[in-house]
Structures are given as C-alpha cells and as structure tokens.
Image (cartoon, rainbow, N blue to C red):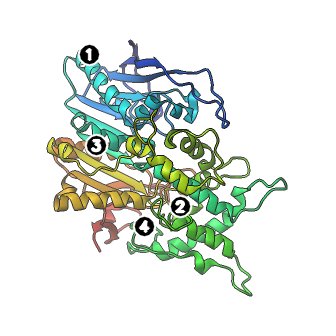
Amino acid sequence: MTSAKWQEAVSGEPAKTLPAYCLVEGVLDRRTGRAAPTSVSGQAGSNDQYAIHFELRLPLDWAGRFFYQGGGGSDGIVNPATGVIPSWRDGPRALARGFAVVSSDAGHSSDQNAGFGVDPKARVDYGYASIGRVAQVAKLVIRDFYGERPKWSYFAGCSKGGQEALQAMQRYASEFDGIISGDPGYRLPHAAIAQVADTQSFSRAAPRSADGHVELARAFSQGDLDLVSDAVRSQCGNSDGTHDGFNYRPDACHFDPVVLQCKAGKTDQCLSETQVQALHAVFDGAKTADGHTLYTPWPYDSGVASANWREWKLGDAHHPSRAETLGAGSMQYVFSTPPRASFDIFSVSLADLEQSIHRKDPEYAQSSAEFMDADSVDLGSFKAHGGKLLIYHGGSDPVFSVLDTIDYYKRLQKAYGKHAADFARLYVVPGMNHCSGGDYALDSFDSLDAMVKWVEHGQAPQSIVAHAGSTTGSKLAAGMTRPLCPYPQSARYQKGDKNDASSFVCASK
C-alpha cells in the first residue's frame, strides 16, 4: 500500500534545505502478531499490529542515486527521509544532493518499545529482514517514477543504523554499491550484555539511597571523570607531534587508572580503590564470574568525561543511564530467547544472558545472535560487483567498543590480505562519543562525499577531513580540522597551522 504527494522546495537550516520532491508513504507486510508487553512485569498490551512502514522522497531533479537512511536504537519510527548523513549533520542532506531517499521503522511501532521482541517475525525484521524488503520495493517505485532504476545505491547509518549498514552489505550485497557504517553495533546482543556487566561493575562503586536503591550516577563525579580524561590525554594524546590530546590509535596506547588511586597522605584529587576496581572491571571487557570473556575491552580515551559517555554509562541525578532503560529493555525482550517476563539489570546473571542470546526456542526460529550479528567477513559478492565499505568509529564510544570494530576490520584484512583496503576502510575518530559529541572530538565530516568519489570515480579516500568545535560543550577551537586516516595509519604533523588538516599527513608507525 502506498500514497504519494508533492512537496515544494524549502530553505533554511540543512534539514530544511530541500528541493522539490514527491513523497511516497508505504506499508509492507501488515499483519496481526503477538501483543507487545506494556510494562516490565510482562503484562500484554493491546497493540498487536505489525507492519514495515517506509517513506520515500523522490527529488524532481534526480542524480540517478538511491540512499537508504539507516535507523537507530529500537527503531519503530519512520524518520523523515531527507538523507541524514550521521557524520555530517551540518552539511546538505542526500536529498538535497539529488538522491532518492528511503527510511523505515524496521517493522514495528515505537508504541511497542522493546516489547516488540516478543513477536518472532518482528525480531527478525528488526535484525535485518526489513532492509531487503524496503530496498527492493523502493527501487521498484523509483523505476516507475523516473523510468529507470538507480545507477548507484548507498546505505548510511550510525549505531543500530551502522549495524543495519553491515547487514545490508552482508545479506543484500547486490542491492548496494556503497556502505557507510558508523559506530556499528554489529554484535548488538553481546554489547547489550556488556551494558549489563558495566552497570553491575559501576554499581559496586556507587552509594545506596536510604531505601537501598543504587545511585549509579554518583559512582563517579564529574571531577573524577575529568581526572581520568586529563590523564588519558596526557599519556595517549601526543602521537601526532602537536600535543593536542587526540588519541588516533586507541588500541595502541595502554592506560591504567591505578596511577590515579589515592595514596596515604595524598591531598589532591584522586580515585578510591573501589572506583579504580570498577574502571578495571569495565574497561578490561565484560566477563562472567569465572573469567569467561563476554565482550571486547574498551579503550581509555578523552571522551570519558563527556556528557554522552555519562548518559550511557552512569546517568545523572535526574535520568537513569541509557543502559538501564534502552539497553535493559532490549536485553529483556529482543535479545533474550525466550523474552523475559521481568528483568533486574543489577542482579541478572551474566552467564545466563550469554546463554540466552545463543538459545533457540520452538517459537523463535533464530537466536538473537543469528538475526542481529552482522559479523561476517564473507564479502565476496559485495566485492565482486564493486561495492565499497567505509566504517568509522568514535574512540570514546560508550555503547559499542571501537576495539570490537577494529577486531572486525582485522578479520577483513586477514581474509582479503593486501586487497582489503581496495574495498573496505576503517577510520577511527579520536575523542568522539557515540556517533557524535565529546569535549575533544573531531565529530563532523562528509563521509557521503568520500564514498561517492570512491564508488563512482575510483578515488579511494586516503584521508577524510574532520571538523572540530561543532558540538555544544566542545573544548576545541571552532573550525579546527584534522585528517581522519585509514586504519592503521594516524595523522602526523608536518608543518604549518596546527589547526589545519593540510598541515598533517597520514602515516603508519
């Protein structure tokens, strides 16, 4: 089912600087499924309607290109299909560049929250299946509207959208020519367990309220996190020759917070032994009580003191951490098989959670690891038709560890040897939190322009210019630029203005 209408060109901010276009709204696979719970107790709600809703915007002046705009979080929302480029929020959207753009809710409504996970098909649609359905239908509409199919097709997303980008490449290789995957949650169920483990570790350094409630936000004050961030910048942020605090290779610098632990007679600011133990438990990677590894370690980076890091890991006095809300809900309903009737993030067994993401059930055809993980390096079909992959990841991402993404890229390098860089490149963004932000972050760069030049003109991005100072709260000079280098290269200062990317080169150690 589809409907269409014309929209006139508007002007103003980047989100509103759009050309004249035809808006097509569609619904696929409408059905009655299992009612989503409305509370953590597992009580069923009345909303049992499921469908894949999508929006396709077709510019009057079309460049022959198709752009699939990835989602985020638990999806459930059809965001305006303007062609948001997650890494370039201040620049023109893909629609303004002549792309036909589609977006989708991934097969469920936000009214169902994470409770949609009780429905077997909704889980799989969310994991990957909705991508293929929407892409194929969108291209049919494009063909009927313009009289021809797209010459080039792109997918871009960050976070869950980054996971969707990798799923699009791995499962629907022939549909896309260029894939941009930002801060990808490509092993989302495993990262969700890490959120539980991190919350439990931080809770051991947190005080309790009079009624016994864990006051997670008080485990570390802002001053405590600033202390860690400053020490990390001092030790790990001087590799480019400018002493600017940027850590271009978070996997190559090893910091131990024990150097900040309070000692007898120490009067200046320091961390308690309990706080240092909590940091070790978190940054060394989630493990079960018997030492079994559940998730990749985290690197120490400057963004540990930024608002986005606290938002995800600790919360504040007025808001619980997103691990306690979004993370716990997804773990309870979407990633656990079967979904759980109740969930306590502070006491649930980590070993049991690991079993649940690999467990199969007669009512659920696939375990969550099977329908969510996008970790395959069997990319022969994608590579054969000329596909290109651009991954970027913030060094201070508190949701998905950049070290996990580096591990994925290393597996790609092992699989394809010296030819891996011919079609796949990884860019580590120093200081950047989850998809954006960070007090010392280079968090704004045009990944789509780099991808188009690579796909259509064979110009592989030797570096991508990133801008700093665009984020509220940034401590960097507005307008500062640096080159983002393809891993494992790093930026090296040569000569000239230390705030200008042209003064740097990309080099290996």
40 vs 184: above or below: above
36 vs 382: above or below: above
Q: CA distance from mark 2 to mark 1?
A: 46 Å
Q: Amino acid at mark 2?
A: Gly
| Residue 170 image label | 3
Instruction: Check contact, mark 4 vs mark 3: CB within 8 A.
Output: no
Residue at the farthest bottom position: 265
Residue at the farthest front position: 362
Decide which of tag 4 and tag 3 comes sooner along the chain: 3
Measured as percent of width and height from the top left, residue 504 is found at: 32, 66
Instruction: Check contact, mark 2 vs mark 1: CB within 8 A.
Output: no
Q: Which residue is mark 1?
A: 145
Decide which of tag 1 and tag 4 comes sooner along the chain: 1
419 vs 143: above or below: below
| Residue 250 image label | 4
Left or right of 124 on screen, residue 340: right
